[in-house]
Amino acid sequence: MKMGSQERAAETQIIAIPLPYQGHLSPVLQLSNRLASKGLKVTLLVISKTQMTISPNNTSINVEFVSEDIEGNDEYFQKFLGTVSWKLPETVAKLTNSGYRVSCVLYDSLLPEVLEIAKKLGIGGAPLFTMSCFVSKIFETAYQGKLNVPIEKTPVLIDGLPPLDIFDLPSFLFDLVNYKTSLKFLRNQFMNISDADWVFFNTFDTLENEVLKLMESQCKITTVGPTIPSLYLDRRIENNKDYGLSLFKPEIESCKKWLDSRETRSVVYVSYGSITVMSEKQMEEIANGLKNSNYYFLWVVRESEVKTLPSNFMEETSEKGLVVSWCHQLEVMSYKSIGCFVTHCGWNSTIEALSLGVPMVGMPQWADQTTNAKFIADVWEVGVRVKIDDEERIVKEEEIERCIKEVMEGEKAKYIRMNSEKWKKLAKEAIDVGGTSDMNIQKFVTKMML
């Protein structure tokens, strides 16, 4: 007797291996939710020193937490891969003995060695790039030896991208003093990419059309984004309203109550992610810029950073501002009272804002954030990018105030909002029924079930 597709799906497993950072874990977890909603079962292997709360929206996702004493230093990836080298075969054996067929390993693109382990086990491998396609194209060009690093001559010309100045590039390409080891791992994402069975990108076709076409000629690129919960896009996955992941305890009720009492597009939302560390001087400039802008603001300041705020700042701004230690970013940005998002421009935060149509003030700090900010301001035109003071190498309060006002009021703000709404519509179309990302995900699921 032939089994139906759902019965076959129940026997098929994939294993997902993310890096334990918010911007890497969230896309893997949400893609896993999408796959599970279409019939696949997923085992998520989370390898981290820190225990975190992960509650997937789908019962077809099983989470296995592996506690390892791994710190963020030069030996981080070697230690991480050392754990994967024994945990992955162990997990495959356990699932096989339980009657499942493990068909593929979904892994962070920064872990290309996982593909070699998977191939030895006789199963497929699929990296997920959690950076944009245009940033990946830059690192691929560096891997091919077509960029002289550190970059000294500008503009940098790369097929499919606009001309780039030094500080439009990822910081790993011009600051080798701090990021020499990081650059090695970012370039090595491409060392065996042609051997991968699938190559996933957290983006959608219309967002990066030209560079996607260029990269598709070299490897099997599959767009699967935006990888954000279904509630904010197509609403097709039941109960898929958040990532099911929390690195910190969010202040949910205080945020909701405060935002509910504000007028439409009257609030500036400020957040720099889970790992960005600001100097005390920079925190002072941000605080003064927010205060002087005279807009309502919701500012996420992690508990470890509260001491860097100017004295009496929260008391002085209590009528205009709310400072919280953490919040659910997507939920906050979905409120009508949010007028703009002041962000470090991490790719996950960027694609969330694009998907919700929220204008941005880009204040990049490191990594790919500088390049994302370039595209936010000059390519998609959904925000502005702050200028850094040449002497102090920080963003001054006057510049922060100017940028906030530029996206909140006047003719340019209207133009930015119009573009933001356009990309919101295109993001939804990509992941909805018949959209490019939706069809790509379905093709993968169908292939896994065969």
Image (cartoon, rainbow, N blue to C red):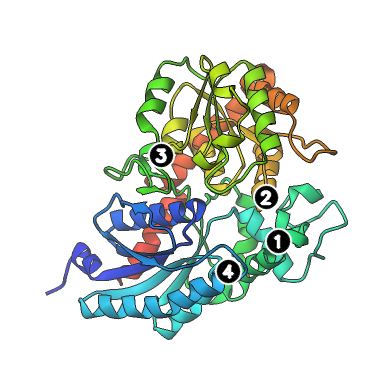
Q: Earlier in the sequence, mark 3 or mark 1?
A: 1
Q: Which residue is mark 1?
A: 179
Q: Is residue 167 above or below residue 233?
A: below
Name the image quarter holding the N terminus: bottom left
- Amino acid under disc 3: Leu
The residues tagged by marks 3 and 4 sit, at their Cα atoms, a distance apart of 28 Å
Specify the amino acid type for callout 1.
Answer: Tyr
* Vertical placement of residue 171 versus 291, above or below: below
Q: Nearer the viewer, mark 3 or mark 4?
A: 3
Snapshot quadrant of residue 288: top right
Q: CA distance from mark 1 to mark 2?
A: 10 Å
Q: Which residue bears the numbered disc 4?
A: 219
The disc labelled 2 sits on which kind of residue? Answer: Trp
Mark 3 closeness class: few <14, some 14–19, many ≥20 residues within 10 Å: many
Give how far across and how far down residue 90 sits, in percent.
33, 79
User: Is label 3 in contact with label 4 (beta carbons under 8 Å)?
Assistant: no
**Which mark is drawn over residue 233?**
3
Residue 209 at x, y = what percent?
Answer: 61, 50
In the image shown, does 358 or 39 lie closer to the viewer?
358
On residue 366, the disc is 2
Query: Under tag 4, what secondary structure?
Result: loop
Q: Gap between marks 2 and 4, in whole Å?
A: 28 Å
Q: Residue at x 68, y 69 (%)?
A: 184
* Foreground of the two, 20 or 442: 20
The amino acid marked with disc number 4 is Cys
